Amino acid sequence: METESEPYVRLASLRQLHHVVAGLNTARSLADTLQTVADGVVEGLGFEIAAVNLVRADGDLVVAALAGSPAAEAMMAGRVGSRASWERRLTMGEQWGSLRFIPYTEGWVLDEDDVPQWHTPSVIADRPDAWHPMDRLFAPLHASDGELLGVLSVDKPRNGRRPGAWGCEALQMYASQAAIAISNARLRSNMQRALVRLEREQQALRASEESFRQAFEYAPSGMAVAEMGGDQHGRLLRSNDALCRLLGRPAAAMRRYSFSDLVHPDDIGTLLRTSAAGGRAELRLARRDGSYVWVSLRNSVVADAADGPRYLLTHVEDIEERKRHELQLAHRASHDSLTGLPNAAELRTRLGARLCDLGRAGAGVPGGAVGAEGAFDEGAERFGDGFGFGADPGAGAAEFGDFDARGIPGGSGPGTEAVEPYPEPFTEPFSGLSAVAPDGRQAAPPGNGLPGFPAVPVPGGHGAGQGGAHHVHTFPPEGDGPGEKGLAVLFCDLDGFKSINDHYGHNAGDAVLVEVARRLSAGVRDDDTVARLGGDEFVVLADGLGRSEAEDLAVRLRNAIIPPIAIEGARSVQVGASFGIGWAACGLTAEEILQSADQRMYVEKRSRAKGHRRAG
């Protein structure tokens, strides 16, 4: 009877197996799938207890699901067994196809290892195939590539017997389908975790982008994003409102430019030398109205993990006010506070920039050195009298003895002041002096640095401008030919200035110095330098002049100085001027050239007749 009913039993078992296998594919998560696997063993395969031991990332196995016994679940769920202990189990006992059966006669050695286990006390039947409470039956769960996913352990068959061939076959089939379901569930779980992680990363990215956008748009200083590489390298992609306001340009218009289009021509080299990553530079950018503003640029690279650096983020800070203060401080350090002219230090710097050590001590200079005394005597003869003002201004010149009440020459009466005679405008030729040092050296120019001869590198020198390799040597003109030009140094000393200070006070003297500075500046070219050396001494540097041109310039400047100068109220005073001309020459120092012009000025001053002088 039992044999005749066996096909019907198998058919019912197949139906039950099909039902529980179908349930494996309905689970929505890995945890649900694992629990469905354990429940399917209890519901469809005739065992009262089943546990799913899942392989963790570290290789150990954890009890992930358990069905059939709440007590066993409470004790075993979540507990971990080592991979080594499980591998020992899967190599012991008897192999039933893909199953591993460990009878109680061998399994006692496993009682003390770290694998969670549960044994249900029961009455042992007296027959050979009876299930012993200490028997163990395991079904390994392998992925399609052979990877061990876990182990399905079953216990306590309902019929009290060890499973026969059909029971083992059904368990193996179920374990195979369970492994597929677990693989799919684990894949779905990994995908879900990846999607969740991706969504979080995207949310973080959106939050970061929004934070950057707000920081970019509402930053108090200018910011810009520019392209890196390619044909559009440096083109501005985005400009914040602060940068647009700073440059007076709308954001749409800014996208047509790069910083190289906006930078001041003198600062383009600074911009090109500024590195992309961490580069800093201070330069001027053009505003829409054509003016320029000083800014500080600071670069950083926005990197893309896939394609490498892509964008250049530039922080633009307005430093116009700081630069203005710096320039004011530099101007104060290099300019006279009263007249606004370059001071003595700045004068020596500008003059020294044109000099080098060529021909020092007469070395390499044709003709050697000549004595200063002889040069001064020769210059005195060529100079003659009448430059500056003296007691006898010459034929046709009126001697002004007094000022009227308004301080204007002519007449006498109440309120009149004694003044110095009004000097006649100077019209006689003025002879300059070649560059001669006080110690008696005179530099004669070799061919280098003259018209028709190339400039050569200077190995060293005391001039401020000799750092470069294209220094052009400076020499005084030999004669008055078209190519004979040089850097003239005109030393001016005011005549009669001390008496103005003594009679009218320092405020009047300051007013005279300011007006003289203005008249001297108005009488020279834009590229010439008018400097106040100190007191009532001024120096003019005029490049590209011949000897006669320098003399003519001295005459024009003296004639510009001698007209009356208004001081307090309606009063006017007059000063004269004595000039000495020196010439810059490589091989001399700036101090030697200034002393040469200074001594020439005193030679001219002493050469005039010394008449009675009255202050005005």
Image (cartoon, rainbow, N blue to C red):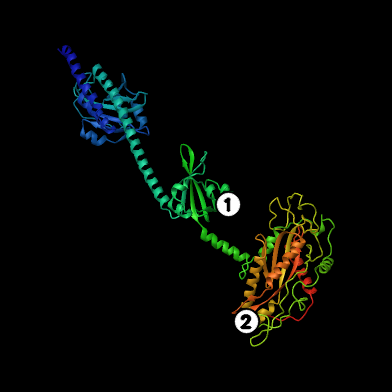
Q: CA distance from mark 1 to mark 2?
A: 54 Å
- Given this view, does label 1 or label 2 mark the residue nearer the observer? 2
Tell me which label, 1 or 2, sits earlier in the chain. 1
Which numbered disc covers residue 473?
Answer: none
**Residue 567, image quadrant:** bottom right
Q: Is residue 586 above or below residue 427?
A: above
Circle 2 crowding by C-alpha within 10 Å: few under 14, some 14–19, many from 20: few
Which image quadrant for residue 390?
bottom right
The x, y position of residue 115, in whole percent, is 31, 32
Q: 337 and 287: which one is in front?
A: 287
Q: Residue furthest left?
A: 1
| Of the pair 513 and 142, the residue shown nearer to us | 513
* Left or right: where 362 falls relative to 266: right
The residue that mark 2 highlights is 406
Give amino acid for label 2. Answer: Arg
Looking at this view, is 404 or 596 the one in front?
Answer: 404
Disc 1 marks which residue?
267
Camera-nearest residue between 210 and 294: 294
Question: Pointer 1 and pointer 2: residues touching (CB < 8 Å)?
Answer: no
Q: In the visual, does 172 lie left or right of 294?
A: left
Dividing the picture into quadrants, the one containing residue 383 is bottom right
What quarter of the picture does the N terminus occupy? top left
Q: In the displayed structure, would residue 531 be above or below residue 139?
A: below
Image side of residue 331 versus residue 469, left or right: left
Q: Is residue 592 visible?
A: no
Which element carries disc 1, helix, strand or loop? helix
Q: Position of residue 341 (x, y in %)?
A: 63, 66
Amino acid under label 1?
Asp
